[in-house]
Image (spheres, rainbow, N blue to C red):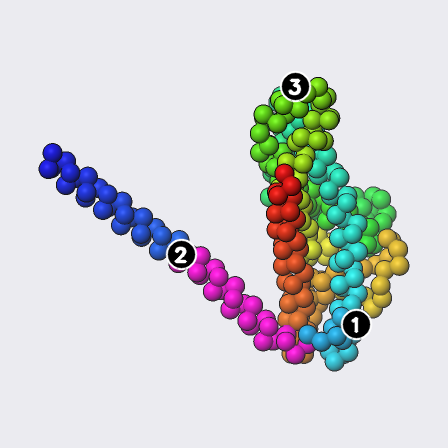
């Protein structure tokens, strides 16, 4: 008995040492990422703090750094989100509902599901090429705001579909069975039992997908979004620019003043992304309480 107890103590002590070592490793890995991110943020804030003034939001881009702003880029990004968000939500959530609740579980469905999951990891520039071929050339939308919004909708659709499917799949089967037991049909069960429970996860996935879209540059460069726009779009077929492209344009210039403007633009873009992520958390918590 004494030998067995000693062996058990040694085993427990070895597991505790391993647990402590792994804990230190994970903390170190997390700390590296946080420290690098904080260093990057501090460096950007130092470079761009002097340019975070009202003129940055009120002025249009200019070849003179002292007169340059990003008004058209901010408004262009917001316009694109306004067009893209409802399209992505309706198409993405609708596809997820069909695949999870209505589609037969056969080989074709599995193939579609595999393709959607694969598309979620495709590089964004591929969607830019697709948008160039379909929206700019085939549909003759040119370098318009509508072409950009449709291209970005293609980019985020697989992400929204996958995240919405996961949220719907997480709803307990007992809720569906209880709804059917009360006499509800399929759509009533989906609309009144499944979607309210899955909505926090769906909404979070949609907002995070929008956050990714607002920071993308490659697809919009491919469809020919302008790097210098000194006006606001008046309709869906006007030329446009967005914040990442404007920041890229400033960074590409050799003058130090434009690099300061780029740093200020990065701060604004990060602030928008953080606000969107914060909104996702608030909405998720709000609807979780209701459910």
Q: Residue at x 72, y 31 (%)?
A: 191
Position of residue 232 measured from the top left corner of the image (x, y, whole percent): 84, 63
Quarter holding the N terminus is top left
Q: Quadrant of residue 278?
A: bottom right
Q: Which residue is mark 2?
A: 27
Label disc, if present, on residue 262 of the rendered structure: none
Count residues near mark 1 (Cα–Cα under 10 Å), then give few for <14, some for 14-19, many for 20+.
few
Q: Are marks 1 and 2 in contact (CB under 8 Å)?
A: no
Give 261 or 13, whichever is nearer the viewer. 13
Q: CA distance from mark 1 to mark 3?
A: 59 Å
The residue at the point 59 percent across, 36 percent down is 166
Q: Which residues are magenta?
A: 28-51
Residue 42 painted magenta? yes
Q: Nearer the viewer, mark 1 or mark 3?
A: 3
Would residue 86 be found to the left or right of residue 164 on screen? right
Kindly tell me whether residue 236 is visible in this rendering: yes
Q: Are marks 3 and 2 in contact (CB under 8 Å)?
A: no
- Asked if 154 appears above or below 195 in the picture, the reply is below
Query: Disc 1 marks which residue?
Result: 58
Image quarter hosting the C terminus: top right
Mark 3 element type: helix
Q: What whole-number distance in Å separates the C-alpha atoms at marks 3 and 2?
A: 49 Å
Q: Which residue is mark 3?
A: 181
Report the residue at 68% width, 20% height from top: 182
| x, y percent for residue 94 | 73, 34
Q: Is residue 97 above or below residue 66?
A: above
Residue depicted at x 73% and y 26%: 187
Cβ–Cβ under 8 Å for marks 1 and 3: no
Magenta segment, prevailing SS (helix, strand or loop): helix
Nearer the N terminus, badge 3 or badge 2? 2
Mark 1 vs mark 2, CA separation in Å:
43 Å
């Amino acid at each position: 008995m004494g030998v067995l107890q000693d062996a058990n103590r040694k085993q427990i002590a070895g597991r505790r040492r391993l647990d402590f070592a792994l804990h230190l490793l994970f903390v170190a890995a997390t700390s590296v990422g946080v420290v690098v991110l904080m260093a990057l943020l501090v460096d950007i804030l130092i470079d761009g703090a002097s340019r975070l003034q009202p003129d940055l939001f009120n002025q249009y881009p200019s070849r003179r750094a002292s007169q340059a702003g990003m008004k058209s880029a901010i408004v262009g990004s917001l316009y694109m989100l306004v067009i893209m968000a409802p399209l992505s939500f309706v198409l993405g959530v609708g596809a997820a509902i069909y695949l999870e609740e209505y589609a037969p579980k056969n080989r074709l469905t599995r193939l579609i599901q595999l393709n959607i999951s694969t598309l979620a990891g495709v590089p964004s520039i591929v969607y830019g090429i697709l948008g160039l071929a379909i929206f700019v050339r085939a549909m003759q939308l040119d370098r318009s705001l509508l072409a950009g919004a449709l291209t970005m909708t293609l980019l985020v659709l697989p992400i929204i579909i996958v995240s919405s499917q996961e949220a719907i799949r997480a709803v307990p089967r007992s809720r569906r069975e209880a709804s059917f037991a009360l006499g509800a049909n399929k759509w009533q069960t989906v609309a009144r039992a499944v979607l309210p429970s899955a909505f926090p996860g769906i909404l979070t996935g949609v907002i995070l997908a929008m956050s990714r879209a607002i920071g993308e540059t490659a697809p919009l460069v491919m469809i020919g979004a302008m790097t210098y726009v000194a006006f606001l779009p008046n309709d869906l077929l006007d030329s446009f620019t967005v914040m990442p492209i404007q920041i890229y344009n400033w960074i590409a210039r050799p003058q130090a003043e434009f690099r300061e403007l780029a740093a200020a633009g990065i701060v604004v873009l990060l602030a928008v992304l953080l606000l969107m992520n914060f909104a996702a958390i608030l909405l998720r918590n709000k609807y979780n309480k209701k459910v």
